[in-house]
Image (cartoon, rainbow, N blue to C red):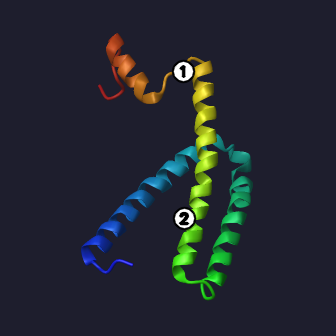
Amino acid sequence: FCSSPIALLSAFCVYEATVGVFWPAIGSLRSKYIPDAGRATIMGLFRIPLNVLVCVLLVIQGWVPLHSVFSICVACLAICVLPLCILRGYARRRRDSEGLLAPSILKIHDLEVGQKSSND
């Protein structure tokens, strides 16, 4: 892989920034969309496949070259893109059918109409 200290530090900083954005975002989404009564159960069920995948990758890591393990991880992440695209399309169609504006468009629209923004 890479042996340049600058490239490694840069990659580490990017990774830490994405993790730093991920956890607060997932926490707010979790509180918004998963009911309090079943949150622990639902999150526990979603952790099962993740833990199985981690265990499998840790076991095969000794038998399979490291680049193949990373390739498997990349393939799993690529597979996750398909449901993401489907859900985004569903949300966009739902928003359009209900006549809702996207949050960024809503802020611009409010300023054009003359309403005060929440920051004022």
**Residue shown at 43% from the left, 22% from the top:** 106
**Residue shown at 39% from the left, 64% from the top:** 16
Element type at mark 2 = helix
User: So how many labels did they put on this image?
Assistant: 2
What label sits on residue 58 in the rendered view? none
Q: Position of residue 52 (x, y in %)?
A: 70, 71
Quarter location, residue 103: top left
Outermost residue toward the bottom in this view:
62
The front one of 120 and 95 is 95
- Judging by the rendered image, the residue that carries numbered circle 1 is 100
Q: Horizontal placement of 60 versus 45: left or right?
A: left
Outermost residue toward the left in this view:
6
**Residue shown at 36% from the left, 26% from the top:** 118
Q: Are marks 2 and 1 in contact (CB under 8 Å)?
A: no
The 10 Å Cα crowd at callout 1, few under 14, some 14 to 19, many 20 or more, is few
Outermost residue toward the top in this view:
113
Element type at mark 1 = loop
Q: Position of residue 120 (x, y in %)?
A: 29, 25
**Residue shown at 67% from the left, 70% from the top:** 53
- Judging by the rendered image, the residue that carries numbered circle 2 is 74
**113 up-or-down from 89: above or below:** above
Q: Position of residue 67 (x, y in %)?
A: 51, 77
Quarter location, residue 108: top left
The front one of 82 and 46 is 82
Could you tell me the amino acid type at mark 2? Val
Could you tell me the amino acid type at mark 1? Leu
**116 up-or-down from 86: above or below:** above
Mark 2–mark 1 Cα distance, whole angstroms, equals: 35 Å
Q: Position of residue 50 (x, y in %)?
A: 66, 65
Which quadrant does the N terminus fall into? bottom left
**95 up-or-down from 51: above or below:** above
